[in-house]
Image: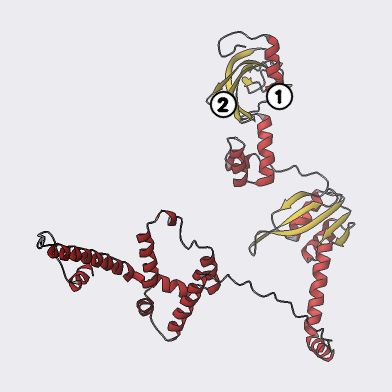
Amino acid sequence: MRDRFGNVLPAVASKTIEDVLLPGIDVRVENVRNSSGILVVEAVSTARPGRCPNCRKQARRVHSTYQRTLDERPLGSRRVIIRLQVRRYFCDRRSCSRRTFVEQVPRLSARYRRSSTGLAGWLRSIAIELGGRPAARLCRRLRLTAGRTRVLRLLTAPAVPDCAPRVLGVDEFAFRKGCTYGTVLVDVEAGHVVDVLPDRTSETFAAWLTEHPGAEIICRDRATAYTKAVREAAPDALEVADRWHLLQNLSAAVEKTCHQHRDCLRKRAEEETVTEVPEVEPMLLPPAEAPRTQIIERTRHRYEDIHRLLEKRWTISAIARRLNLDRKTVRRFRDTDLDQLLASARDRRPNGVLEPFKTPQAVNTSSSDREFGGEGRVLIEQRVLLQAVIELADHAVEQIALGGGMPVSVVVAPPAVVGLGAG
């Protein structure tokens, strides 16, 4: 065996790898390499010459050798592939129709299989527990290359014993409810299924009992078809009813009896006086009131104003124009409960995170916007322009009083013109 640098490794290391990867299997590991996250193991069969699958004669001559590729169980998070070199033998028996055959390594390979026997056992166990598509999804998580069809092909019907179990359970089940039914036979003592019959007729069950004698106790439901089959094929067997069907029949009988005497039961129930137990009124805790802040009070008053106008059949647009609000705000106050509005107002930042960085003029502007609605910004602009005009007028008057005349660059506009221009 060689490492990835081409150096020959000692036999002890090779033996250790064989014990880890293929313990107890008659193979010799020649090389192990990692190829794109896949562990590739190259091995050679060292088993004794095999026997012909037809005549079972042990072979003596080797015809040729060739390499097989087998999927093995993953090692950690890596997929494992075994490239196994096997031998093809001659069959020396002249009466045998087979001339050559390929050896099979015990506990590793099988005929017409591209996976090892260990991996096939894993997939078979997964298929038994999960079925088709769930088993395929689990195989993908375990890094096993197996689809649902391959998993289902590994399922084989269990061997049916020649004799019936001592305690045999018989019941029907639905292949397709309302259309096709079958019969399941269960070993009650062992707790596993013995066989499945394609229908629920007495002839099929009687034929099965004739082919598989030995049932001493037959646990069944009260169907007449199974009773007829037991009397014909196993007359000495003891017939008993299982617990589930007993409880089902008992509940059906009680329900039928109560339905027949419902008038008597109703009169009896009306005659009985039931003592009324006084109900204890639950102690209700007073609701928690929100703190009386400016935002809370404004939210409460706005909610009352909007709902008062809504009661008077005002539209959303009319309410928005009357209260200087946006229509989305009016619609939110109409569709939201007062408690939710107060909760959101209580958690809201009244000033905002940018409040320390605002100038006094911006603060006044935002306060005016809150007080006068959308017209606050226009009023502030008019005040600033009017103040600038007044300062220019005062400066011009001082120049005239000093005898300097009217400055050419100064134009005094009346307040009405300023108001119209700002508006």
How crowded pointer 2 is (Cα within 10 Å; few <14, some 14-19, many 20+) is rated as: some
| Residue 405 sits in quarter | bottom left
In-image side of 129 versus 386 (left or right): right
Q: Classify 282 as above or below 211.
A: below
Q: Where does the image place residue 388, in percent across and percent down from the top left?
A: 23, 63
**Viewer can see residue 262:** yes
- Residue type, label 2: Ile
Q: Residue at x 15, y 64 (%)?
A: 396
The residue to which callout 2 is attached is: 38
Q: Where does the image place residue 78, in percent across and percent down from the top left?
A: 60, 29
| Residue 118 sits in quarter | top right
Describe the element under mark 2 as helix, strand or loop: strand
Sequence-wise, which precedes: disc 2 or disc 1?
A: 2
Q: Residue at x 77, y 44 (%)?
A: 160
Q: Classify 63 as above or below 228.
A: above
How crowded pointer 1 is (Cα within 10 Å; few <14, some 14-19, many 20+) is rated as: few
Q: Quadrant of the C terminus?
A: bottom left
